[in-house]
Amino acid sequence: MLRSFCALIVGRLVGLVARWLGRGATSLPGYVALKIDPLLMGHLAAGYEKIILVTGTNGKTTTTNLLASILRAAGIRVVHNSEGANMPAGVATALLGQQGEVAVLEVDEGTLGLVTSQVPAGTVIVTNLLRDQLDRYHELEQLAAAINRALAALPAATLILNADDSLVTSLGQGREGVRYFGLARTPWSQATTSEVLEGHICPRCHRPLQFNFYHYSHLGDYFCPRCAYQRPRPDYEVVDVELNTGGARFNVLYPGGQVAFKTPMPGIYNVYNILAAASAALDLKVNPATIAGVVAAFLPGQGRAETFRLQDKQVTLMLVKNPTGLSVALQTLVAGREQASYLLAINDLAADGRDVSWLWDADLSPLLQAPYQRIICAGLRAGDMAICLKYQGVRMAALEVIPGQEESLDSLLTAPGDDCLILCTYTNLALYRRLLKERGATSEVTPLPSLS
Amino acid sequence: MKLRLCHLYPELLNLYGDRGNVLILRRRAEWRGIAVEVTRLSLGDKLDPGVYDLYFLGGGPDQEQGVASSDLFQKGPWLKEAVEGGAALLAICGGYQLLGEYYRASNGETLPGVGLWAAYTEAGIKRLKGNIAIQVEELGLERPVIGFENHGGRTFLQGARPLGQVIYGDGNNGTDGTEGARYKSAIGTYLHGPLLSKNPHLADYLLELALRRRYGEVELAPLDDSLEIAVNEGVFRRFLPTKGKW
Ligand SMILES: [Zn+2]
């Protein structure tokens, strides 16, 4: 106990110093405290009435932030790792806050076992298992197996699982207390998919699954023709989705009722994020009207989709980190847009993923069919992006390859028209934001208030 | 002129943008006025060895690869007959391994392969991963073939001809300096993903091999490859070690 007491005091001191230095307490306090007491997470967890873990490959940060906001609006004192610091040090840092009844913790899908072996979570949300950074987790089935082992440490936990992802539903096999969330068929659901698929093997008998429809990537309504494994019936289901450039509207059916949602966040993937957070909140008996109220006002944090104004131009900046992200970003941003110019900035540093082969797995057709004025390829892998566009039939006269970030932005800003979009990989994001600010751009999205 | 391309297990063996290669072969043929017909064959489909000029086989995650391998073992004799008859073939990563003699897993279990090339693969511990450049003799000495590799298996040639010699990267096994395998007009390689995108010379070589079966020696009209060549040279130089083997 003395050891963990020391760890706790030192961790909090580091947190104070870090905040005093104006750096924000991200993972450093937890990192230092875990060095002193590797079992600290377990000791700290005992101080909470309920712990909710959020894991999966995509949408963790938005789901975690949204769920924490909903619970706060319901009058619960909540601690969460708001900066997306989801490795054990970040989780320990959040728990060091020790000022809540409930902890909502985003946990990296690859290190979930380190957390579940110590933290007796009562609820685990799994958003999805989409292809992401294959450099790191080279195969999704192995990842699903690792998550399954991690969940075995929590036999009594309630699992809140994405019904539309066969890899995620495989985690619910043989368990009690599983709730499913999913999307009913939408006007955009397709009978086939032009994206490369993963997670389309039956988790029970390992034969290929068949699909009634796809939402995107391998998410959809699937069934196994051999052993009858199928998409479970969702306990929480989104119906009547309407997407528009200003966000989305939809209804959520839950046991005993339905509630209407309106959100300023665009894109079908945000509908999933909202549904995941709302399912957990409904399961905790939070008033549906409270949930809808928080969702209506909730905006994404910096870097997910940010809009800037620069003289007469509107510039939208968005992070893309994998083929699904790029496909969905193009689908969301390009739909209904008139003449616009695009900048695709692709790097291959460690945080981006060293291998850029994934560009060829994305569905670029929404962009190629749009009335684009100019498409500029930038970054260390500008040429790879350009070749990919060339073979998919881009109008070559509209294509430019300008690897330098600064030069590429200047070219984008001199393109005709006033609508500019920048899609970039991780290490380009802060750079383009800085370059935009240097040129006098003002951000039009209100950043999330600090929740710590 | 018409090229008949057979894409094997497109829904199972499709990691890392492999399918880009089929698109690149199709476009480079069509830009020269050669019609292309792509047939997708998968589990349980019959393969008629006389029909196709060019086969493509990608890599997949473990489970998908396992499902494909048992079926490929059935199709193996047809595929061998096709290659003996002059058909060209490109197999990447998992597809490359499955066409060898066998694969030995880390638990010692041995899975038989098709045996198109005299080579076998063993499971390794650390994945061999990173940018790679190789020298392919048939393509002349001035331009390397470049790509990215990411494989756990180590392949050892047992008399099969390698595709090329490693300039930098790991290649077949990280030790003997060879990369890939050749048998007649068939090519296997660990350079995964959209390999042909940065190697238009390799793409055209494959097209020539494929057309030879039906049309004899064909000289392909030149295309504007300035973009592809610039990327090939840029990426090659960027990852070229300043010291070490060259
Ligand atoms: Zn089944």
Image (cartoon, grey):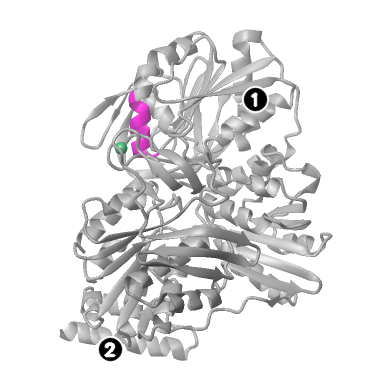
B8 shown above or below A353: above
Cα–Cα span, label 2 and label 1? 66 Å
At which x and y percent is residue B204?
Answer: 65, 25
Q: Where's residue A110, x and y in %?
A: 34, 58
Residue B63, magenta (yes or no): yes
Read off the magenta span: B61-70
Identify the amino acid type marked 2: Ile
- From the image, give the main secondary structure of the stretch colored magenta: helix
Image quadrant in which the N terminus of chain A is located = bottom left
Tell me the element at label 2.
helix
> Is residue A204 found inside the magenta-colored segment of the image?
no
Q: Residue at x 81, y 45 (%)?
A: A397
Do the CB atoms of the residues marked 2 and 1 lie less than 8 Å apart? no
Q: Is residue A389 visible?
A: yes
Q: Residue at x 73, y 27 (%)?
A: B31
Amino acid residing under circle 1: Asp
In the foreground, B238 or A31 = A31
Residue at the location (48% across, 74% down)? A292
Q: Is residue A71 left or right of residue B191?
A: left
User: Which numbered disc covers residue A263?
Assistant: none
Callout 1: CB less than 8 Å from ligand 1: no
Hey, which residue is sitting farthest front in the picture?
A: A256
Q: Where does label 1 land, which residue?
A: B204
Q: Residue furthest left?
A: A1
Quarter assignment of residue A64? bottom left
Whether marks 2 and 1 lie on the same chain = no
How would you rate the neighbour count of disc 2 (Cα within 10 Å): few for under 14, some for 14-19, many for 20 or more? some
- Res A428 visible: no
Query: What mark, if any, has residue A9 been given in the picture?
Result: 2
Ligand 1 location (quadrant): top left
Quarter of the picture holding the C terminus of chain A:
bottom left
Residue A272, position in %: x, y? 47, 61
